[in-house]
Image: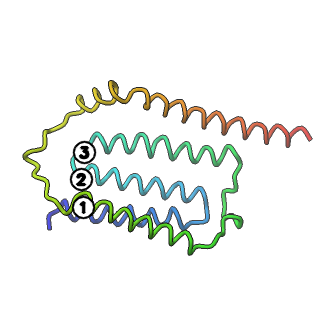
Amino acid sequence: MTVTDILIAALGVVVVSAALAVVTTAHVVRAGLWLVVALGGLAGVFLVLTAELVAWVQMLVYVGAVVVLLLFAVMLTRAPIGASPDLDRARWPAIGVGVGSAAALVVLLVHAYRWSHVDLDDVPEGTAEQVGTEIFRQWVLPFEVLSVLLLAALVGAIVVSSRRSGSAGGR
């Protein structure tokens, strides 16, 4: 076992533990903060695998944008920040769906790869320039649509929160 294997295993434990904390906590803000830990640990895995560009994209897009958008949406809509009794639901159906989804994913991956070994000498080395060229030539429209969607979600959260505060303040 190499140092890389040990680091990936340790980061994997952190990511899985944080992901479990995300779905088991009753506090929405704490769930968002545990999501930051899980996504940051995943970026650490990318760094160990020497995929620095993917790690930075993980940190900037997911940790820096999506989680902040989630936390701002919670705060702007005045959703309950603490434990919420209306979120208590039967856990067994959720556990069944989670275990079923995980089993389906494992079966899919095993069937797709059949425990094959990839010879890294045959894989062409990619560069940040190649990734940028691919993104901004082939994927520019979905990239821009996603940015407009995130902007619309933020504007929608502001509108919803201003309507609630405006109607409560006028009475």
SS state under label 2: helix
State the separation of the CA atoms marked 3 and 2: 8 Å
**Residue beneath label 1, please?**
7
Left/right placement of residue 61 relative to residue 167 reads: left
Q: Residues within 10 Å of mark 1 (few under 14, many from 20)?
A: some
Closer to us: mark 1 or mark 3? 3
Q: Position of residue 133 (x, y in %)?
A: 28, 26
- Residue 140 sits in quarter: top left
Q: Which mark is residue 155?
A: none
- Residue 8 sits in quarter: bottom left
Residue drawn at x 37%, y 64% is 14
Q: Position of residue 18 (x, y in %)?
A: 44, 63
**Residue beneath label 3, please?**
51
Most distant residue in the right direction: 171
Most distant residue in the front direction: 111
Measured along the vertical axis of the image, is residue 62 above or below residue 133?
below
SS state under label 1: helix
**Residue beneath label 2, please?**
48
Left/right placement of residue 75 relative to residue 31 reads: right
* Residue type indicated by callout 1: Leu
